[in-house]
Amino acid sequence: MSVTSISSAPSVRFAVTARAVADGARELGLVVPAFRSPPRLPGVSRTIVRKPGGVVVSVLAKGRPFGVLVGDLVEGVVVANGLAGAAAGEVRDELWRRAEQHGEIGVADAA
């Protein structure tokens, strides 16, 4: 799928990027949260809920820069795994790399 087609289909772009982040987390041996959009709470851009079956990260995709949405997905993995400090930074860097490679995110999206 080309950058143009993913950019013109935000739900597909979200799904492709969420899968890349999830696959990256799994390969790093981390807990992989479920990703969904939008959050059930009105007026919030991200929620993280711990349920008996695992963690659910919900993000608002509409009307937000895509890079911010990716940051929410990545941070959801960091929070779900209770990471802090250097370990959190390393995971963030790696998951952003994965999202950029597979979700076709460019520098303009991260701004």
Image (cartoon, rainbow, N blue to C red):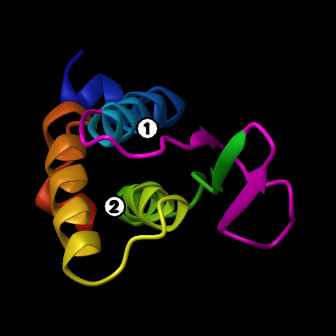
- The boundaries of the magenta stretch are 27-53
Q: Residue at x 16, y 53 (%)?
A: 94
Nearer to the camera, 22 or 106: 22
Q: Nearer the viewer, mark 2 or mark 1?
A: 1
Up the image or down, 23 lies above or below 97; here it is above
18 vs 51, left or right, is: left
39 vs 80, left or right, is: right
Q: Residue at x 51, y 67 (%)?
A: 79
Proximity of marks 2 and 1: CB atoms separated by less than 8 Å: no
Residue 69 tag number = none
Up the image or down, 89 lies above or below 107; here it is below
* Residue 104 spot, x, y in % from top left: 20, 37
Q: Residue at x 46, y 26 (%)?
A: 12
Up the image or down, 69 lies above or below 8; here it is below
What's the residue type where badge 2 is placed? Gly
Residue 47 within the segment the image draws in magenta: yes
Up the image or down, 15 lies above or below 57; here it is above
Q: Callout 2: helix, strand or loop?
A: helix
Q: Callout 1: helix, strand or loop?
A: helix
The residue pinned by badge 1 equals 18
**Which is more N-terminal, label 1 or label 2?**
1
Using the rendered view, name the quadrant where residue 2 is placed.
top left
If the image is split into quadrants, where does the N terminus sit? top left
60 vs 9, left or right, is: right
* Residue 57 spot, x, y in % from top left: 62, 52
Marks 2 and 1, Cα distance to the nearest angstrom? 12 Å
Residue 67 tag number = 2
Residue found farthest to the top: 1
Q: Main secondary structure of the magenta part?
A: loop
Nearer to the camera, 26 or 73: 26
43 vs 8, left or right, is: right
